[in-house]
Image (cartoon, grey):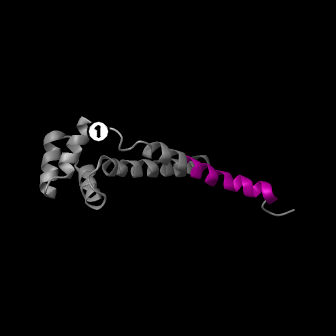
């Protein structure tokens, strides 16, 4: 008999990775599905306006005028993202999708750490 428990041991060790792969694939598919189909909502429009401001200072000022209780971190990240990927609804929303996919990965890692 093999020390790792043979095929059963390999399967037990591999299933979390398979589950993670499935969760990431399903999650990404659902998040990217019809990503650019709808027009921008009111809050997305305000975020776009701040992110597309001519300067970083203007972006921070505009975001502060719209929502003074929030840092402009998202708008500044989105500003750089839009410089690379464009200003379409799909390009703009895809940054949030990337963070959503990363959050699935972090939840998996946290759960694995807590539950062993």
- Which residue is farthest right? 1
Q: Is residue 26 magenta?
A: no
Drawn side of residue 19 relative to residue 70, left or right: right
> Which residue is depicted at the point 27% across and 39% down?
40
Q: Position of residue 51 (x, y in %)?
A: 21, 51
Q: Secondary structure at mark 1?
A: loop
- Mark 1 nearby-residue class (10 Å; few <14, some 14–19, many ≥20): few
Q: Residue at x 16, y 57 (%)?
A: 56
Q: Is residue 54 visible?
A: yes
Specify start and end residues of the magenta stretch as a single range. 6-23
Which quarter of the figure is the N terminus placed in?
A: bottom right
15 magenta-colored: yes
* Residue 5 visible here: no
Extreme residue toward the front, this view: 37
Give the main secondary structure of the magenta stretch.
helix
**In the shown orientation, is residue 75 left or right of residue 5?**
left
**For the view shown, which residue lies furthest in the top direction?**
42
Residue 16 location in percent, x, y?
63, 51
Determine the image quadrant of residue 10: bottom right
| Residue 14: percent from left, percent from top | 68, 55
Position of 65 with respect to 106 (left or right) is: left
Q: How many marks?
A: 1
Q: Nearer the viewer, residue 113 or 19?
A: 19
Instruction: Find disc 1 in the rendering and name its residue.
Output: 39
């Amino acid at each position: 008999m093999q020390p790792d428990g043979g095929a059963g041991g390999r399967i037990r060790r591999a299933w979390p990775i398979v589950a993670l792969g499935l969760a990431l694939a399903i999650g990404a598919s659902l998040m990217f599905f019809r990503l650019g189909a709808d027009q921008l909502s009111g809050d997305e429009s305000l975020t776009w306006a701040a992110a597309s401001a001519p300067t970083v200072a203007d972006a921070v000022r505009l975001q502060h005028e719209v929502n003074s209780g929030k840092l402009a971190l998202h708008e500044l990240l989105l500003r750089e993202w839009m410089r690379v990927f464009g200003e379409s609804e799909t390009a703009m929303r895809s940054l949030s999708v990337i963070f959503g996919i990363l959050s699935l990965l972090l939840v998996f890692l946290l759960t694995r750490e807590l539950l062993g």
